[in-house]
């Protein structure tokens, strides 16, 4: 299965989502992570050698795919892809995941992204990320709004906690962090992974 995580905007938890989903899929079968983001954020995350899956760039991916034959591939794309990039991304994945926060500006960009993707007939789903823990009502309203607009989304949302920002610097995942809310975040990403496989 090829899972691509994309977004027109930075700061929406795109790389964090891609890395944690790769860890989930690696726990099921061999998984290769392709860092196609120009910032190479996931590659920096992997330099600590603590991740359970292999991380490569889009330049080296074809050779590794041939050599490793992974069961799953997770791709982290660059932020703000061009329409041409988005079309190419859409044509080469089994599921396109669009993370978005609940901030109005991010949701506005999300709607634009969805409009572009709907023309391509690619399977996609929205994932609400960086959601304040006390925003249950907002999340419920957003889910209803997106459902009424025929925008598919995950039933699980990813909450926002400060410790998550430190994970890339330490090269670790929420499943290994010592913060009191770490297992909650890992459980949420696990739920998302299960929704994908369901």
Image (spheres, grey):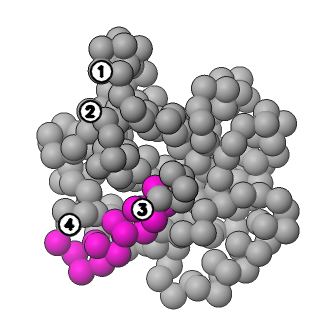
Residue 191 drawn in magenta:
yes
How far apart are the alpha carbons under marks 2 and 3?
Answer: 19 Å
Label 4 crowd (10 A; few <14 / some 14-19 / many >=20)? some
Label 3 secondary element? helix
Residue underneath mark 1:
68
Residue 80 image position (x, y, % from top left):
62, 38
Residue 180 drawn in magenta:
yes
* Residue at point 64%, 56% (across, down): 126
Magenta residue span: 178-193
Sequence order check, earlier mark of 1 and 3: 1
Residue underneath mark 3:
189
Q: Is residue 94 above or below residue 143?
A: above
Left or right, 181 with respect to 135, comes to left
* Residue at point 20%, 49% (across, down): 171
* Residue at point 26%, 33% (across, down): 54
User: In the image shown, does 46 or 81 lie closer to the viewer?
Assistant: 46
How far apart are the alpha carbons under marks 3 and 4?
Answer: 14 Å
Task: Write down the quadrant of residue 187 in the picture.
Answer: bottom left
The tag on residue 54 is 2
Residue 66 image position (x, y, % from top left):
36, 13
Residue underneath mark 4:
177
Sequence order check, earlier mark of 1 and 2: 2
């Amino acid at each position: 299965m090829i899972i691509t995580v994309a977004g027109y905007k930075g700061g929406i938890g795109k790389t964090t989502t891609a890395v944690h989903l790769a860890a989930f899929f690696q726990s099921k079968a061999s998984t290769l992570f392709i860092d196609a983001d120009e910032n190479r954020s996931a590659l920096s995350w992997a330099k600590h050698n603590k991740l359970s899956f292999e991380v490569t760039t889009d330049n080296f991916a074809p050779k590794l795919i041939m050599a490793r034959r992974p069961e799953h591939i997770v791709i982290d794309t660059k932020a703000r892809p061009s329409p041409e990039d988005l079309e190419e991304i859409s044509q080469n994945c089994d599921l396109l995941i669009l993370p978005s926060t609940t901030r109005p500006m991010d949701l506005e960009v999300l709607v634009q992204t969805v409009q572009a993707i709907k023309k391509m007939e690619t399977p996609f789903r929205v994932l609400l990320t960086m959601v304040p823990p006390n925003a249950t009502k907002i999340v419920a309203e957003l889910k209803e709004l997106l459902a009424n607009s025929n925008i598919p989304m995950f039933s699980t949302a990813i909450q926002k906690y400060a410790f998550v920002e430190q994970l890339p610097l330490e090269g670790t995942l929420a499943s290994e962090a010592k913060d009191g809310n770490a297992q909650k975040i890992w459980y949420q990403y696990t739920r998302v992974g299960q929704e994908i496989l369901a």
